[in-house]
Amino acid sequence: MVTAETAVGLPALVLLVAVLIWGVVAAGAQIRCVDAARVGARAAARGDADALAQAAAAAPRGAKVAIDLGPTTARATVEAPCPGPGRLAALLSVRLTATAVGAREDVPVDGG
């Protein structure tokens, strides 16, 4: 009887552990997206020519990085895919995004 219960419960336990591990991996990738967006926005706000490269270096693998320079702000957006584990890749895949905005330092401020 114990063997039958184990045979039924073990696959469910393995599936639960796989989903929990994927959740931790997805949370880590989201944190990397946020960090990459902050790095890109900070570099673009300072006027660095390689702001896009800096953000891409900090982003997760396969991420798309975009930097938009406005009149007074610099905005960096990072989008990265996060596929699910194993055969659940199609079911559990998510797209992670993060955006950061910084005030441009290379633009003169009109003061009075």
Image (cartoon, helix red, strand yellow):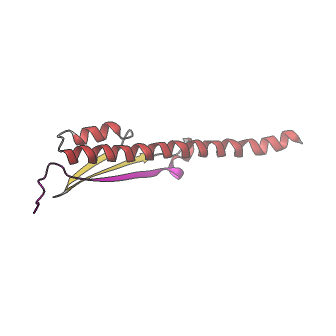
**Which residue occupies the extreme right position in the image?**
1
Q: Position of residue 44 (x, y in %)?
A: 22, 46
Q: Is residue 92 left or right of residue 13?
A: left
Q: Position of residue 32 (x, y in %)?
A: 41, 42
Q: Position of residue 16 (x, y in %)?
A: 66, 46
Q: Position of residue 71 (x, y in %)?
A: 15, 58
Say which of 62 and 76 sits in front. Answer: 76
**Which residue occupies the extreme front position in the image?**
112
Looking at the image, is 54 positioned above or below residue 101? above
Q: Magenta stretch containing residue 37, yes or no? A: no
* Residue 63 placement: quadrant: top left
Say which of 74 and 28 sits in front. Answer: 74
Say which of 34 and 79 sits in front. Answer: 34
Q: Which residues are magenta?
A: 90-112
Image quarter (top left, top right, bottom left or bottom right) of the C terminus: bottom left
Q: Is residue 24 left or right of residue 12?
A: left
